[in-house]
Amino acid sequence: MSTALADFFRGGQVVFHIAPALKEAFLHSELGDATARDLQFPFEDSYIHIGTDVGLVFNGGRTRLEGVLLSEKSHKDGKSVSLTLVGSLVQSPSHWGERGMETFTFHFGSRQMDMPLLEGAKQHLEAQGRDPLNDEKFSDLSKFDEAERVRILESWATRDEDRRLHLENIPVVLECVRMVANALLYVSRYPDDIEDDYQDGFPPGFRERIERSQGKALERNLSKARSSGFTLIKRVGSVFERAMQVEASVGGISDSPSPHMRRAHWRRQAFGAGLTQRKLIWIRAARVLGGAVRERPYLISDGVVSG
């Protein structure tokens, strides 16, 4: 957690806030065959605000998910992605000895980068949850001297809790990966639906000074705001929300019998000369049998949503 926070502050404290309507759409959007390598990180380190209203809990039900710290790292074997789930304790402890953890970090290793996202996340979590003593590769420690064998066994024993949490957290991590991956895919495909803004509760005094200043004065005022716990954020989905409101106002729902919804999903679509290239596009949820909204890619042009 310390490393994730240090990376976040060093990376400029970039916060993405997802609009409620878009967040709800992401919760029900299939990722298709998108992989971790398909994710484009506009910043190496950032924070995606999800909000406790989604109702996701982790660490044995002790922690309510609030958001995710993201970090993309390059190394000699390629790239890896780290997600640190951040939350608030469901119940305040009576003393520190009973305090639960408020974070959980897991990685997409190099071997999972080209797998479908949810499959790669699940495989990595399951691997981290396995007891090495039950793994044939680690069952024979005869090549180590006695002192080293004792050290290895003691080290494994201290990681029992880590292994248990990796397995317990699989359901919430997969939902979290769905949300975060949708957000990153959306941000990279529809950059026109991102706007810089102030976080909720930003003091008017700080806001006025920031908007009036330039250059070094601007940096000083931003630094003062950050040191007081306030920051600028990037709001994602305002255009999408307005489009949903307009669509609802013009009668996007029909009274035809037996309607049902086809889930939103990402799809690789052919484009370019001879349709030889592929790009991921988001297909919005569609009402089948009775809906006026046909399945179509969600596009933004000049600030307006179109099909």
Image (cartoon, rainbow, N blue to C red):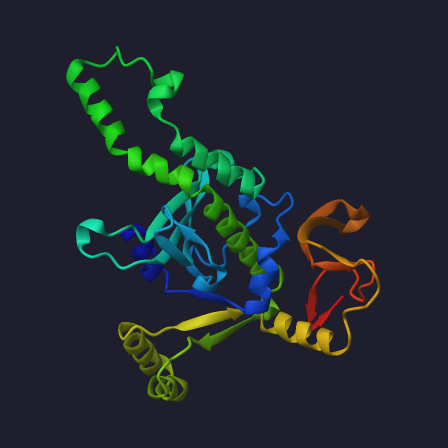
Residue shown at 41% from the left, 40% from the top:
168
Residue shown at 53% from the left, 55% from the top:
179
Q: Is residue 239 above or below residue 121?
A: below
Q: Position of residue 272 (x, y in %)?
A: 76, 51
Give the position of the C terminus as an image quadrant. Answer: bottom right
Q: Position of residue 105 (x, y in %)?
A: 37, 46
Inspect this view and state whether residue 295 appears: no
Residue shown at 24% from the left, 52% from the top:
99
Quadrant in the rendering for residue 118: top right
Q: Is residue 168 left or right of residue 225?
A: right
Residue, far left: 147
Front residue of 166 and 214: 166
Q: Is residue 220 above or below residue 142?
A: below
Q: Is residue 295 above or below residue 177?
A: below
Q: Is residue 63 left or right of residue 252?
A: left
Inspect this view and state whether residue 11 appears: yes
Quadrant in the rendering for residue 135: top left
Residue shown at 29% from the left, 50% from the top:
101
Q: Position of residue 140 (x, y in %)?
A: 31, 13
Q: Is residue 133 left or right of residue 200?
A: left
Number of numbered markers? 0
Q: Position of residue 13 (x, y in %)?
A: 37, 65
